[in-house]
Amino acid sequence: MDILLVIQVVCFDRPRLFDVCRRKIQNEADMSKWLASFPDTDPFRRDGLDRFSKRHEVLNAMDRLDIHWMNENDPMYPSCFSALHDPPMGLFYKGTGNLNPPFCCGVVGTRRPSVMAEHRIAAVMGALQHLTVVSGGALGIDALAHDAALRNGMPTIAVLTGGLDIMTPTSNQGLFQRIIESGLGMVVSECPPGVRPKPYYFPQRNRLIAALSKKLIVVEAAERSGALLTANLALNLGHDIAAMVGAFNSPQSKGCYNLMNDGAEVIGNTADALQFLGAQHQKKIRKKNNKGTLGSSLFPHLKSDGHGLPDALAHFLELVPTAPIHVDDLAGHAKLSIEVAIEYISVLALNEDIMVLPGQMVVRRG
């Protein structure tokens, strides 16, 4: 068994011990002696010996579940981890993809996003190309970012907090499988199979997201959140940060406002996001012209005269005032369900007919 893999199985949650292990441990006998040298009162002695005794169970689980591992000498190992003072010894992974992409954008945020967050993220991702999206596979913004990347044919990397035999949260199992089966994405973890997430694993995981993200977008983050920790780690690595707020006066946006006050760039619309990420990542989006619109391609079942928006979208646009109106009020005025109204709003925003404002407000462009 690769001694580097043995070291990671034993010390995965204590990456600062990796340098010691590199110097002292050349084989499994060295590992056994080193662990036995810890005092009986040291909890790591007990945990380490237990993990060492189960190292072959980890190998069996990897074989059974098609979980792979790369060490720090593997060409696939992310070169950006060299900027960390405690880089992982290796990574467990499932799926196929590139952990050294030319450009990787991190997207993190609240687990309780606003109703418009999904559509804001979808609008941004729909306008991008030639980048890899990285996030933490959690509920909320993380899941929305991974899903939007897949829907737009972009690679995505989910960095998880536990073993890949468990892949939590369980409600995202379908998303993880889509990433693995897409041929474009990977699910990775520093933790070996059999490890369930613990609270103190999350900051450790976040340092990997920060390192991978050449630029990081924080969406609707509360004042005390893992997303802000990731942002601070990315800042310490010299990476650029941008913030996207949600509703006015919302607790889920307070962390983003703090980031803005500290100098983070502000993303209030798709154009801001494209400017932050760079023109080379902008997808050519079809604008309105006399041959049709984006709305025509997304809603081919709607009647259209062939010279503009489909009739239903055009009628909806007429109902959008030039003063901000809440999404719920607009849906009621148009006699549409909130789901259909948000679909129409998303398309009209991409066509630049309307603007989506903080607080779930929309307004027609003058």
Image (spheres, helix red, strand yellow):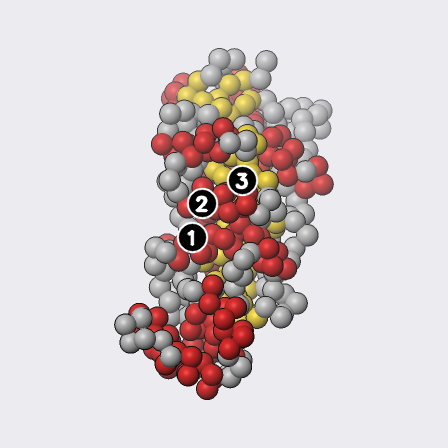
Residue designated by label 2: 229
Measuring 61% from the left and 25% from the top, which residue is drawn there?
352
Q: In the drawing, what numbered circle is on residue 203?
A: 1
Which label's residue is closer to the chain start, 3 or 2? 3
Measuring 54% from the left and 75% from the top, which residue is drawn there?
23
Q: Amino acid at mark 1?
A: Pro
Real-space CA distance between mark 3 and mark 2, rounded to the nearest whole angstrom = 13 Å
Q: In the figure, residue 338 lies in which quadrant?
A: top left
Q: Amino acid at mark 2?
A: Leu
Task: Rate crowding at label 1 as few (under 14), some (14 to 19) or many (20 or more) other CA atoms within 10 Å.
Answer: some
Measuring 51% from the left and 77% from the top, which residue is drawn there?
24
Q: In the drawing, what numbered circle is on residue 169?
A: none
Q: Are marks 1 and 3 in contact (CB under 8 Å)?
A: no
Task: Rate crowding at label 2 as few (under 14), some (14 to 19) or many (20 or more) other CA atoms within 10 Å.
Answer: some
Q: Is residue 115 above or below residue 42?
A: above
Q: In the figure, residue 166 lies in which quadrant?
A: bottom left
- Left or right: where does residue 193 sit relative to residue 83? left
Could you say whether the residue bearing mark 1 is in a helix, strand or loop?
Answer: helix
Which label's residue is closer to the chain start, 1 or 3? 1
Q: Is residue 254 above or below residue 197?
A: above
Camera-nearest label, 3 or 2: 2
Real-space CA distance between mark 1 and mark 3, rounded to the nearest whole angstrom = 17 Å
Q: In the drawing, what numbered circle is on residue 217?
A: 3
Q: Are marks 2 and 1 in contact (CB under 8 Å)?
A: yes
- The reply to whether residue 110 is visible in this rendering is yes
Quarter of the picture holding the C terminus:
top right
Q: Amino acid at mark 3?
A: Ile
**Residue 150 spot, x, y in % from top left:** 55, 50
Real-space CA distance between mark 2 and mark 1, rounded to the nearest whole angstrom = 7 Å
**Residue 298 spot, x, y in % from top left:** 58, 36
Could you say whether the residue bearing mark 2 is in a helix, strand or loop?
Answer: helix
**Residue 334 spot, x, y in % from top left:** 43, 21
